[in-house]
Amino acid sequence: MSEYDESATIDLQVPIEQVFEFVTDIENLPVWAGAFETIQNYSGDPVGVGSTWTSISKFMGREVVSQCEMTTFDAPTQLVFSIKNMAGDGDNIWTLEKLDDDHTRFTLRLKGKAKGIAVMAVGLIRSQADKQMNGDLAKLKKMLEA
C-alpha cells in the first residue's frame, strides 16, 4: 500500500491567534518545521488560498524539491496545503483548537500517496514523518512558550 496518513498533536500555552499567525507566516517554516529547510518562489502576502511556494529539504539523505499550494485557509483554526514532489503527492492539514484563552491544541497531519521508487519505502516514510512532526511540534512549543 502506497498511502500514508500520519499525525502528531501538542498542547501549547499560547493563544490560538498567536499560534496561527506564526505558523502561517510561510517564511517562518524553516525556523520550526524541519521538512521545509528552504522556501523559494513564495507568491507573497497575505497568505491564503492560492498562495504557492517551493520547498527544498532533505529526506533520507536526498534533496527533495516540493511544490506547495495553500488549498484551505480558515483562520485561526485550519489550513491545508498540497505538496507535490518526486516521492509523492499529499496534503499537510494543520488544525488548531482553542482550549481556553491562553491554550491551543495544534495537530499536524500528513496524508498522501507515495509514487515511483518511494512506494517501496512507504513504511520508512511513515516512520520518518511521525518522527519529524513530533520533533517539529516540540521545537515550536519551545519557541512559542519561551
Image: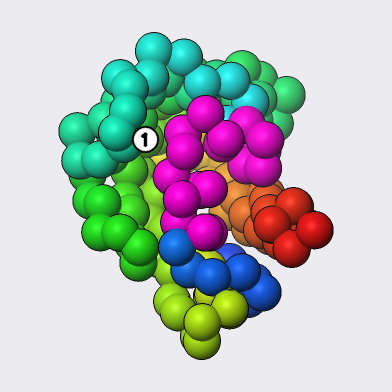
Q: Residue furthest bottom?
A: 100
Badge 1: how crowded within 10 Å, few (<14), some, or many (20+)?
many
Q: How is the image coloured?
A: rainbow
The residue that appears at 66% across and 20% down in the rendered structure is 62
Residue 36 lies, with reference to residue 146, above or below; the image says above
- In this view of the protein, which residue sits in the foreground, 136 or 15? 15
Residue, disc 1: 83
Q: Where does residue 82 sit, x and y in percent of width and height?
A: 31, 40
Q: At which x and y percent is residue 46?
A: 29, 33
Q: Which residues are magenta?
A: 18-34
- Residue at 52% across / 59% down in the picture? 18
| Residue 54 seen in the current view | yes
Quick one: SS at disc 1? strand
24 part of magenta stretch: yes
Q: Is residue 119 above or below residue 13?
A: above
Residue 12 screen position, x and y as percent: 64, 71
Quadrant holding the N terminus: bottom left
